[in-house]
Image: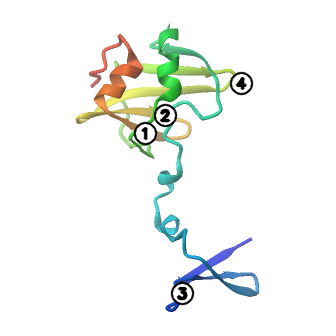
């Protein structure tokens, strides 16, 4: 089904919507979503909501003490993955979910913040320096 979204009605502020052979007036409560960046609709949790984190490895070493920290971690912002390829030496984090799904992040310093880069889907999770330190535990959080 295809929707054509029109302008707003001058009297009531309702928005014109064209569907098939009908034109309707609908309350204009959702128009900010029409122009919002698609990334604004993404969940900022690093562990997908509803998932159970079964194991966590940083640079191949099991880190069970960090599982709860990762379960509640939220990125400050999410964006489409940057074009630059990360250099060697950045911490790699592998999450193994109870349903068998594997999620991999690479931590990259980006100015004052740290980015947790995910290849699939291709996203960058912007983290504060404090959050990066908490998520990496004893691993050096001042990645390059």
Whole-angstrom CA distance, mark 1 to mark 3, is: 41 Å
Gap in angstroms between the C-alphas marked 2 and 3: 45 Å
Q: Earlier in the sequence, mark 4 or mark 2?
A: 4
Q: Residue at x 52, y 84 (%)?
A: 13
Disc nearer the start of the sequence (2/3): 3
Q: Earlier in the sequence, mark 1 or mark 4?
A: 4
Mark 2 or mark 1: which comes first in sequence?
2
Q: Which residue is mark 3?
A: 12
- Return the mark for residue 118: 2
Pick the residue in front: 70 or 108.
70
Earlier-in-chain disc, 1 versus 3 = 3
Q: Secondary structure at mark 4?
A: loop
Classify 10 Å Cα crowding around label 2: few (below 14), some (14-19), many (20 and above).
some
Q: Are marks 4 and 2 in contact (CB under 8 Å)?
A: no
**Are the residues flagged by discs 4 and 3 in contact, CB closer than 8 Å?**
no
Direction from residue 129 to residue 9 in the image, left or right: right
Neighbor class of circle 3 (other Cα within 10 Å; few <14, some 14-19, many 20+) is few
* In the image: residue 128, left or right of residue 117: left
The one of 128 and 110 positioned closer to us in this rendering? 128
Q: Nearer the viewer, mark 4 or mark 2?
A: 4
Picture coordinates of residue 113, whole percent (x, y) = 28, 34
Q: Residue at (27%, 25%) from the top-left corner? A: 144
Q: Quadrant of residue 76?
A: top left
- Across and down, in percent, residue 40 comes to 47, 53
């Amino acid at each position: 089904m295809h929707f054509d979204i029109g302008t707003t009605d001058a009297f009531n502020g309702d928005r014109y919507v064209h569907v098939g052979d009908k034109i309707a007036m609908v309350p204009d409560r959702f128009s900010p979503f029409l122009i919002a960046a698609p990334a604004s609709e993404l969940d900022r949790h690093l562990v997908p909501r509803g998932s159970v984190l079964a194991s966590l490895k940083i640079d191949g070493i099991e880190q069970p003490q960090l599982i709860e920290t990762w379960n509640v971690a939220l990125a400050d912002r999410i964006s489409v993955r940057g074009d630059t390829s990360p250099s060697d030496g950045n911490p790699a984090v592998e999450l193994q979910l109870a349903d068998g799904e594997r999620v991999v992040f690479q931590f990259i310093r980006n100015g004052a913040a740290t980015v947790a880069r995910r290849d699939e889907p291709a996203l960058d999770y912007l983290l504060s320096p404090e959050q990066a330190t908490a998520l990496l535990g004893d691993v050096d959080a001042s990645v390059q």
